[in-house]
Image: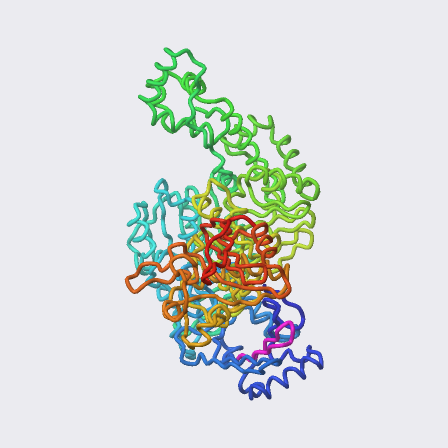
């Protein structure tokens, strides 16, 4: 968890501060730090510059970041962890020679609020967040992984600047003294890229690179994006004034003006480039620029930008600046889709389809789409079925389109209209045939889904205060007419929904309804928590509620779980290290969004502090997900262990791992299996004993001094099961017992005088003979014990009535009893009778 206040950054109950923030600490805290400094033998501002104070004040760590102020994400050089209680131990770790040292994020939170560098560091953090670099916090804590994440997003980090791979300022820049009159080398900004640039990645993400559209790269540089697009079957061409000046400028569906206008020093040429690129776009122009909060201090002022040491010009924009620049010179509204990347639609129908598409619930279409009606007469049903089978591809395509629109498709919308007319004569006849083959309930469901999608789109457009369209896209016009009669009625319905999200009782009722349909885990009058892939199946009011959170925060699809707070007007997003790959994933990021305050609260977890676990994950997914069967089996197995209270958040990770280990369990993939480790003999075996107690309790072992150690890991597990299932309950009820005979190895068994039965008595647990066969095939484990001042027959009776024992042997009311536990419980009770020759023989099986 990460939060901040005026005195530092709090991560998982510990507080981080830079030494310049010590003025905000109490005298008690300063005295603790002084004590820890003496204990660790470190000097402030020499050995360390960041301190971490645990919540209980029992531990203080000193961290040394040599380049705290000089590097954007400084590397940890050395750390000391001083224990102020108990052993007063100090642990030191050096990362000086590490190839992948820890790095520090959000360092502005460690400084006093009045510090002069706060604004600079905040800009860096804001940019990183906007680029989605914190989407997977499990990989950001170390230098190498951090660089890979940045590169994967289409950027690289140079000093305090995130440089798009389409517009790199070389890290080898020198602080040369350049004259503003020096010629600007624009072509030097084009770099070889090893992946698609950020704007091209976004085009792919939003479905524009499906092969149906042509792309023109205006200012293509060395053509890396072009080659990648062409290799993927995309019709792509490009022009560049330096690298491809002889190429002609082509009209295309999409034009990419990627990091071009920010390298043009002449404002008029900049405008010409923008307008020229837009003139070639038939559907969409993508404009990408360097943002002002990525500004590098190197270089000299030149016009409205800087001249770098390599002779390249850079103009750094703010998002508002770019919006104004685009609207002023194109007279069009831009849509921000990522930091420094904007979509400008020339085709307003396409723009509306883009915005509507972001509100569509595709997964609800439609599990029963292939159902065939059976009310027709047998002969006609057979004829129609044969005809359907003959033209199935054509009809399935039309049926899918009908479901997606939620209404009868118009002729202009049918992709294969000529083939439809050739086979059936007319579109209405075809639709009637389809309706006879399908279930009307499916169409009714599709109608409702499409109507809800439109309400979500309209409501969010109103919430975001987007400019109204003069004309609706034709398909959207047909939607409005079919579902709402007119646009005014649709707006009124959307407005009512917007007001409803402010009513807690309606949100709570919608959450309860969603949970009843397998969409998440609902807690009465508190919250609904579910996986993000299920969001589009939620009731309309909840989709709008989440959509408003999206408008405030940004894209939430990188989160794994969403928690809707039904009463407080909040939304929480959670991300885990490997949600589907692990049965108990670790939470790495939590973001709480307050609609009322328009604020966000970030709670981050890093590698130094154990992230919390998500228990009973099957609650938040459902049976339609591929891993659900394995997950619910695991959850059931975990609950059946009865080791943990999972009614709330469950145990913390160290407690969970420790308890699981003590109980001789481990996680293996999506299963719980028995541990194959050999525990320390002094490890607890149940509540009252250790493993050593079962090994040394016998008379023969005490006399001979033989080690009597189990060799098989399963023998230790069997002893644990005996202790927890039989002995612990007995002691809880009767008080402490005295062990008289416990585990017996082959070596000890050979030294025991008198008649014993290792093949039957289970004292050998799971041990094996030299030939590899089990000594006792009954498995489990056994011990003999007595309780002072208790009738052991009554004790045996209580065991039989209150435990799942395997076998009990009674030797008399004042003698030790023999009891065993096994997974194959026989529940056998045997009274032993002492014969005249001094031997015990079975007497009765009744108490």
Vertical side of 511 occupied by 634: above or below: below
Residue 198 locus on image (x, y percent): 42, 56
Would residue 735 appear left or right of 659 to someone viewing this image? right
490 vs 269, nearest the viewer:
490
Q: Quadrant of the N terminus?
A: bottom right
State the residue at coordinates (35%, 15%): 382
Residue 265 locus on image (x, y percent): 45, 64
Name, please, the residue furthest toward the front: 836
Q: Is residue 55 magenta?
A: yes
Query: Would you say residue 167 is visible in this rendering?
Result: no
Query: Would you say residue 765 is visible in this rendering?
Result: yes
Would residue 112 appear left or right of 741 to someone viewing this image? right
> For residue 592, which quarter of the picture?
bottom right
Count all numbered tags in the image, as a single digit.
0
Residue 397 locus on image (x, y percent): 38, 29
> What colouring method underlies this structural image?
rainbow
Q: Which span is picked out in magenta? A: 50-63
Would residue 271 appear left or right of 5 to someone viewing this image? left
Residue 8 locus on image (x, y percent): 63, 72
622 vs 259, nearest the viewer:
622
Vertical side of 112 occupied by 416: above or below: above
Q: Main secondary structure of the magenta part?
A: strand
Q: Is residue 160 magenta?
A: no
Vertical side of 22 occupied by 806: above or below: above
């Amino acid at each position: 968890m990460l939060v901040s206040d005026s005195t530092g950054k709090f991560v998982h109950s510990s507080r981080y501060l830079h030494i310049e923030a010590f003025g905000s600490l109490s005298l008690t805290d300063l005295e603790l730090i002084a004590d820890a400094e003496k204990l660790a033998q470190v000097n402030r501002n020499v050995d360390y510059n960041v301190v971490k104070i645990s919540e209980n004040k029992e531990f203080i760590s000193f961290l040394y970041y040599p380049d705290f102020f000089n590097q954007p994400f400084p590397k940890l050089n050395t750390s000391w962890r001083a224990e102020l209680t108990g052993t007063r131990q100090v642990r030191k770790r050096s990362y000086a020679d590490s190839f992948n040292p820890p790095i520090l994020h959000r360092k502005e939170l460690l400084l006093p609020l009045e510090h002069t560098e706060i604004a600079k560091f905040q800009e860096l953090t804001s940019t990183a967040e906007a680029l989605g670099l914190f989407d997977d916090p499990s990989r950001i804590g170390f230098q190498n992984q951090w660089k890979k994440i940045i590169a994967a997003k289409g950027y690289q980090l140079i000093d305090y600047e995130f440089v798009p791979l389409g517009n790199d300022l070389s890290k080898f820049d020198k602080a040369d003294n350049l004259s503003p009159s020096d010629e600007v080398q624009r072509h030097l900004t084009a770099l070889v890229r090893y992946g698609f640039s950020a704007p091209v990645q976004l085009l792919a993400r939003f479905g524009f690179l499906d092969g149906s559209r042509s792309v023109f790269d205006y200012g293509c540089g060395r053509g890396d994006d072009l080659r990648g697009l062409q290799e993927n079957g995309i019709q792509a061409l490009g022009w560049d004034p330096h690298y491809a000046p002889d190429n002609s400028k082509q009209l295309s569906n999409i034009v990419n003006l990627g990091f071009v206008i920010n390298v043009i020093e002449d404002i008029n040429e900049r405008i010409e480039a923008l307008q020229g690129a837009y003139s070639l776009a038939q559907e969409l122009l993508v404009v990408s620029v360097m943002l002002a909060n990525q500004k590098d201090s190197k270089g000299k002022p030149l016009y409205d930008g800087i001249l770098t040491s390599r002779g390249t010009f850079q103009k750094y924009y703010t998002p508002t600046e770019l919006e104004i620049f685009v609207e002023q010179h194109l007279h069009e509204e831009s849509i921000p889709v990522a930091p420094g990347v904007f979509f400008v639609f020339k085709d307003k129908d396409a723009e509306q389809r883009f915005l509507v598409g972001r509100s569509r619930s595709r997964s609800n279409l439609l599990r029963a789409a292939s159902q065939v009606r059976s009310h027709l007469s047998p002969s006609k049903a057979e004829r129609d079925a044969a005809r359907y089978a003959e033209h199935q591809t054509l009809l399935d395509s039309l049926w899918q389109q009908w479901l997606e629109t939620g209404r009868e498709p118009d002729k202009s919308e049918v992709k294969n209209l000529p083939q439809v007319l050739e086979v059936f004569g007319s579109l209405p006849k075809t639709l009637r045939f389809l309706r006879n083959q399908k279930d009307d309930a499916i169409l009714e469901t599709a109608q409702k889904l499409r109507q809800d999608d439109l309400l979500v789109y309209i409501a969010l457009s109103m919430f975001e205060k987007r400019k109204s369209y003069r004309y609706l896209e034709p398909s959207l016009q047909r939607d409005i007419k079919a579902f709402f009669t007119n646009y005014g009625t649709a707006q009124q319905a959307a407005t009512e929904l917007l007001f409803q999200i402010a009513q807690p009782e309606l949100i709570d009722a919608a959450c309860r309804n969603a949970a009843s349909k397998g969409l998440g885990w609902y807690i009465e009058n508190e919250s609904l928590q579910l996986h993000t892939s299920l969001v589009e199946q939620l009731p309309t009011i909840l989709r709008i509620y989440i959509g408003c959170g999206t408008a405030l925060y940004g894209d939430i699809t990188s989160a794994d779980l969403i928690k809707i707070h039904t009463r407080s007007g909040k939304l929480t997003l959670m991300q885990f290290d490997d949600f589907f790959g692990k049965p108990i994933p670790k939470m790495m990021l939590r973001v709480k969004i307050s609609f009322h305050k328009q604020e966000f609260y970030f709670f981050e977890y890093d590698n130094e502090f154990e992230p919390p676990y998500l228990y009973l994950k099957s609650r938040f997914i459902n049976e339609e997900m591929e891993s659900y069967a394995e997950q619910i089996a695991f959850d059931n197995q975990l609950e059946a262990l009865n080791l943990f209270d999972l009614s709330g958040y469950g145990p913390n990770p160290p407690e969970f791992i420790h308890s699981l280990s003590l109980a001789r369990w481990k996680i293996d993939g999506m299963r719980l299996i028995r541990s194959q480790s050999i525990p320390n003999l002094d490890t607890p075996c149940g509540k009252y004993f250790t493993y050593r107690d079962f090994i040394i309790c016998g008379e023969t072992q005490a006399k001979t001094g033989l080690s009597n150690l189990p060799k098989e890991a399963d023998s230790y597990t069997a002893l644990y099961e005996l202790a927890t299932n039989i002995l612990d309950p007995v002691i809880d009820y009767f008080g402490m017992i005295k062990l008289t005979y416990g585990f017996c190895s082959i070596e000890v068994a050979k030294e025991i005088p008198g008649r014993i039965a290792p093949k039957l008595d289970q004292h050998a647990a799971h041990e094996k003979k030299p030939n590899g066969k089990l000594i006792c095939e009954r498995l489990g484990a056994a011990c003999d014990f007595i309780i002072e001042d208790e009738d052991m027959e009554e004790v045996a009776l209580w065991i039989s009535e209150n435990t799942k024992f395997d076998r009990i042997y009674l030797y008399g009311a004042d003698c030790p009893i023999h009891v065993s536990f096994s997974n194959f419980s026989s529940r056998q009770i045997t009274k032993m009778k002492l014969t005249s020759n001094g031997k015990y023989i079975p007497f009765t099986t009744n108490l």
